Image (tube, grey):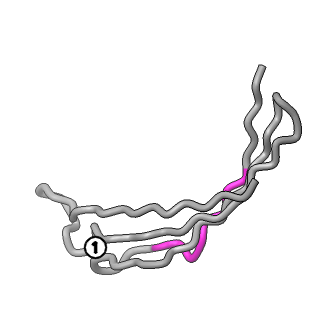
């Protein structure tokens, strides 16, 4: 079964006495495509790839080029 998801994150800058307000916060939008493969009623593996479609972060921050997730659901 194919999957498609759009997600967004808006983060404000850090605050407080020791905060790095210059290099925190921003706006990010991701598109996640993947697949769910029901093997049986009790075992369902899945895989997703999250790709950034928009990134606007403050200052110098590390942002991923992509995120890959692989997992499985087990039912007892």
Above or below, comparing residue 73 to residue 34 in the picture: above
Horizontal side, residue 60 vs residue 50: left or right: left
* Crowdedness near tag 1: few (<14), some (14–19) or many (≥20) residues, C-alpha within 10 Å: some
Of the pair 24 and 69, the residue shown nearer to us:
69
Which residue appears at 79% of the width and 40% of the height?
44
Locate the C terminus by quadrant: top right
Above or below, comparing residue 55 to residue 32 in the picture: below
Horizontal side, residue 39 vs residue 66: left or right: right
Which residue appears at 51% of the width and 74% of the height?
52
Of the pair 65 and 41, the residue shown nearer to us:
41
The spot of residue 70 in percent (x, y) is 73, 53
The spot of residue 59 in percent (x, y) is 29, 80
Residue that lies at the very extreme toward the left in this rendered image:
17
Which residues, given as a range, are shown in magenta?
63-70
Tell me the residue that label 1 is attached to: 23
The spot of residue 48 in percent (x, y) is 67, 59
Residue 35: say if magenta. Answer: no
Picture quadrant of residue 67: bottom right
């Amino acid at each position: 079964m194919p999957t498609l998801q759009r997600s967004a994150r808006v983060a404000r800058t850090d605050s407080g006495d020791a905060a790095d307000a210059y290099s925190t916060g921003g706006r990010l939008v991701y598109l996640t495509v993947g697949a769910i493969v029901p093997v049986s009623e009790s075992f369902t593996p899945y895989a997703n790839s999250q790709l950034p479609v928009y990134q606007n972060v403050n200052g110098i921050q590390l942002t991923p080029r992509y995120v890959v997730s692989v997992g499985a659901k087990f039912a007892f």
